[in-house]
Amino acid sequence: MGISTKNLVVVGQGAAGLAAALAAAQAGRGADVRVTLVDKAAESEAGGNTRWSPSYMRMASVDRVEPSFVHDMLAATQYRCDETYFATLARHAPATCKWIAAQGVEFIQPTYYLAKGPPRIQPLGGGPAVVEQLVLAAKKANVEFRYGCSARGIVRDNGRITGLEIAQDGIRQVLPTDAVILCSGGFEGDGAKMREHFGDGAEVMRLISPGGKFNTGDGITMAMALGASGSGDWSGMHAEPVDARSTNSAPVVLVYPYGIVVDKNGRRFFDEGGGLVHETWEWFARDMQFKTPGRMAFAILDSRLLTIDGYERAIRSEVPPARADTLAELAKLIGVDAEGLAATVAAYNAACTGDAAKFDATRCDGLKAAATLAPPKSNWARAISEPPFLAYPLVGAVAYTFGGLATDDSARVLADGAPIPGLYAAGEITGHFYVTAPNAVSVLRAFVFGRIAGLEAVSFLRASQG
Ligand SMILES: Cc1cc2nc3c(=O)[nH]c(=O)nc-3n(C[C@H](O)[C@H](O)[C@H](O)COP(=O)(O)OP(=O)(O)OC[C@H]3O[C@@H](n4cnc5c(N)ncnc54)[C@H](O)[C@@H]3O)c2cc1C
């Protein structure tokens, strides 16, 4: 009896979708599995968040994760995550990274912003290089790509997946398929869903990069229509502070720990030195969006910023800071209450009683302000006293959301704990993060579980032959 060809459709051309499609196409060589990847964006824009991401990955080197990796994930999620998921991630990460490298993506050990932290690797050329190289490799492996093609629903017959409903060029049709891998990202691009989960003001939150606008939670909705369970933290999102004036992608300003941050009344509202920048940026960005008058804030620094070795690495805005010789002039330039700012800086400077020689931007230096200061400043508390004074107007920008689909360590989508036959998911669309995003893990897990999903889907299709 001949072997019939089975169809597999992957939804989304980010890190997860590309890894899934490529792994499936390579495993399905011999032509018993035909792989199609659909993306709702035009070819020039497809790639979602991955296309815009520097794609730092939490690895000690290409072939090694830190021994503390799983523990760090448990701690970041306040022990709410599925430990098996992250243990699987750690186990498969080295082989996956070597496989990605074999497709033409070179990895380097990057210099991170300013502050150190866990070791990371990075694809040379970041996310754009990932998308470019993996699309090339997938085309070579005979993956068919369809752009401007939006997945709308999964068709089932007697419990078996038989098709994917798509809309392309204004026409709705059903693409016949025997299995589907959903890699269509979170819901940060859908204002109504953002508002539903994060409350008032979330619908106008800025997207950190243009790729996010395509991630409107479609895959989550489609899988849930089949009974898939939700998982992850539905009130969690990864957000970072960006320059309010910039129109660039991800114009982050990560020097705020070395000065103070005030609202438009000139008042401080959090501990700017509460941890390394990647430990405070998410809450700071969220507080700006949801708790600060006018949904913005201002990082206030003095000329000593310019003497910090490599400070430019922590500023990715193309717009120079506001600059003035006095705080009163600076306040006027940025539209902050001048009396409020003067009083705040005076109180802050009076509390900077530590030895300024201990200042070290690269680590938590323990240079804390006097306990009388409220809110406290736990590190890098150096007086703001040397003109010119500098300011960056900031807003919070969302990168991705945490709530998503429940999946197991074979990347199968779960409904009440049982896998939905033929349905897989990987990347941002899956709900495994809680509380705060573990630093530099989103691309890594997209690669690892994308590849697992591709291989598992091929095994499933082969098992269901005949
Ligand atoms: C500026 C920025 C910096 C970041 N930095 C890092 C970092 O250094 N390290 C890290 O680990 N993470 C980082 N992240 C997060 C990380 O890049 C993403 O979470 C990850 O790349 C997501 O990959 P993905 O494949 O799941 O989704 P995406 O890359 O977002 O891809 C989803 C794709 O699905 C498509 N799609 C959506 N809906 C449909 C539909 N209905 N039909 C068809 N196609 C659809 C979209 O067009 C898109 O191409 C960053 C994110 C941003 C934006």
Image: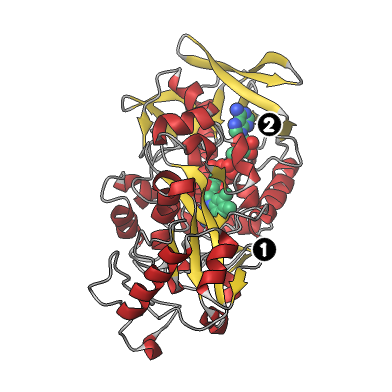
Closer to the camera in the image, 121 or 234: 234
**Residue 320 image position (x, y, % from top left):** 65, 67
Give the labeled residue for mark 1. 319
Q: Which mark is residue 327?
A: none
Residue named by callout 2: 31
Q: CA distance from mark 2 to mark 1?
A: 52 Å
Please state the horizontal and vertical placement of residue 263, each as a whole percent of the image: 44, 57
Residue kind at label 2, given as amino acid type: Ala
Task: Give the residue displayed 63% in from the left and 62% down from the top.
Answer: 317
Q: Is residue 122 left or right of residue 117?
A: right
Q: Nearest the camera: 200 or 20? A: 200
In the displayed structure, does residue 267 sit left or right of residue 313? left
Image location of residue 229, percent across then percent down: 37, 26
Where the N terminus falls, by quadrant?
top right
Q: Residues within 10 Å of mark 2 (few under 14, many from 20)?
A: some
Q: Residue at x 51, y 65 (%)?
A: 254
Front residue of 149 and 243: 243
Q: Secondary structure at mark 1?
A: loop
Ligand 1 quadrant assignment: top right
- Badge 2 marks a residue whose secondary structure is loop
